[in-house]
Amino acid sequence: MRSVKNEIYYNAMMVIGIGFLLVFSIIPMFGVIIAFKDFVPAKGMLGSAWVGLKHFNRMFALAETRNVIRNTLVIAISKIVLNIIVPVSFAILLNELKVYPVKRVVQTVVYLPHFLSWVILGIMFTNIFSYTGIVNQILGKFGVPPQMYMISNSSFRGIIIGTDVWKTFGYGAIIYLAAITNIDPNTYEAAAIDGAGRWQRIWFVTLPSIQGTIVLMSTLALGNVLNAGFDQIFTMYSPLVYPTGDIIDTYVYRMGITKMQYSFSTAVGLFKSGISFLLITLSYTLANKFADYTIF
Amino acid sequence: MNKLRLSDYIILAVLLLIGFICLVPILNAIAISLSDKTAAAMGEVVFLPKKFNTSAYEEIVKEGRFFHAFGVSIRRVLLGVSIGTALSVVMAYPLSKSPRVFRQRNAYMWLMVFTMLFNGGLIPTYLVVKNLGLINTIWSLVLPGAVSVYNTIILMNFNKGIPPSLEESALIDGANPLQILVRIYIPLAKASIATIALFTMVYHWNEFFMGKIYINTLDQQPLQTYIQGLSVTLTTQQMASMTPEEIIRKLAVSNVTFNSAKAIVSMIPVIIVYPFLQRFFVTGLVMGAVKE
């Protein structure tokens, strides 16, 4: 039943929200023109001189920027891969647990880190990996000399990737647990009657049943190839680990806010947004084609 | 069938260990915050406080800055949650209509999804916020992220599951869409609305970056931004001119017990709502991710 009167109501309901999006999301999109200009605040966005691809050329010429892109890819791809493997393994393991009260306790505990901010966790992990922290205390018992892991280029990436997995694996497992719950119990019984042991049940029943979810989540993760996690790295890094830990987002922040190279910073950010846009679009298209996934 | 075998005990042990690992940083921070300063700095604290004392917490209370920032964050959460949830609720209803009934629906939808896929970036967004005169006001923390497209889509998908016959009979009785939203959809979607309200709350509580770039005055800083600013920052030049021993000493000077206590206290609101969150988020997440 279409009625113009109702449509007026519908449009009115959209107006405020869309207005916010126009002001805070759409208008800034036009602001990316400063990536092609030498933006001087006093001259304004329109008054500043056009310089074409100058900032992009500089970006690709700088060894610093190339390193930042490499760090971003290494950290983000490691996170993507581990953030699929670990939650899937954990969900399967949890499904095998038969002591139900313990199951509930473990679930409660592993979901918690997802809701804590990186600011707080940054303080906690700095304690743990500090010169006098738990890690050095434990390794000291095995005769390993203490090290400052947070400012060492050989360990920083590992800490970033590991603590990210620590924070997200529990929450990430929810979707796989939901998929496992949907498996028909008869399948397991049939497998058991045929003499399948635990490993065979996992390998031939559980994994194939959640394969679709794994593929879907991997496809959607494609959009994050350039997202190495700003909040986390920003709260945990220091100049000493820029060689291995500086990523596009932290670089854009330092160039833009600290060094006030507005146009250059925007150019680097635009490069990232552009590629991410293509990747997300590709991932949604793939997810839609192969898993019937739709965003709306 | 119910007999536990050796492998069941191994799985139990592994899962208990995993659960414990998830708590290690928190337990360690609690122990440090309740320890003597020197003992904590010397690395004598693991999970039990050394020379138990609550002076770090007393310092927080005395300092005042912490609870001022705490108050700013509370205000931000109240404004952010009420505005954000209201906008999602109001937008999710028309968006759940088919384009046959609401012809502009897909145009709005594409615009919203586009804002999820692409953004203008740090500096252009900053300039907009600045030109609107929002810098150093609480609104700079609330308005730029007021519309959560993701939450709106979650609610929209929930609305789509509500039988259309409910609405049709009300329309025949002469109700307008606003009345239908308030009388039919909102009461039915209560649980979903609560879910997105809780997620919005956690988001606003934890978010620190807006406070970092849009707020330059200390008395408007939200809590996470304030805490983030506490960590000792050494510039490259400083570090280059220092020996490793000096860097170690400089970093140790940062007040470990005090900062840990602040981290613990700032976690409390999230811990309080966590039981409610946990009840809702499984359904919420599944609603958003798996669609028919």
Image (cartoon, rainbow, N blue to C red):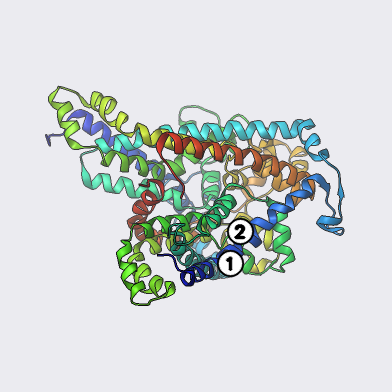
- Residue A80 higher or lower than B123, as above or below: above
Q: Callout 2 environment at 10 Å: few (<14), some (14 to 19), or many (20+)?
A: many
Q: CA distance from mark 1 to mark 2?
A: 9 Å
Mark 2 highlights which residue? B225
Residue depicted at x 55% and y 55%: B107
In the image, residue B168 lies at what x, y percent?
Answer: 33, 68
B33 to the left or right of A21: left
On the question of residue A136 being in view, the answer is no
Residue depicted at x 33% and y 61%: B162
The one nearer the camera, A55 or A126, is A55
Q: Label 2 marks which chain's residue? A: B
In the image, residue B288 lies at what x, y percent?
Answer: 41, 50
Which of the 4 image quadrants contains residue A199? top left
Question: Looking at the picture, which amino acid does disc 2 mark?
Answer: Thr
B59 to the left or right of B130: left
In the image, residue A40 lies at what x, y percent?
Answer: 85, 54
B190 to the left or right of A186: right
Q: Callout 1 environment at 10 Å: few (<14), some (14 to 19), or many (20+)?
A: many
- Residue B266 higher or lower than B242, as above or below: below
| Labels 1 and 2 touching (C-beta < 8 A) | yes
Q: Quadrant of the N terminus of chain B?
A: top left
- Residue A68 higher or lower than A231, as above or below: above
Q: Which mark is residue A210?
A: none
Q: Which mark is residue B69?
A: 1
A214 to the left or right of A152: left
On the question of residue B217 being in view, the answer is yes
Q: Label 1 marks which chain's residue? A: B
- Residue B123 higher or lower than B2, as above or below: below
Q: Which element is circle 1 on? A: helix
Which of the 4 image quadrants contains residue B59? bottom right
Question: Looking at the picture, which amino acid does disc 1 mark?
Answer: Ala
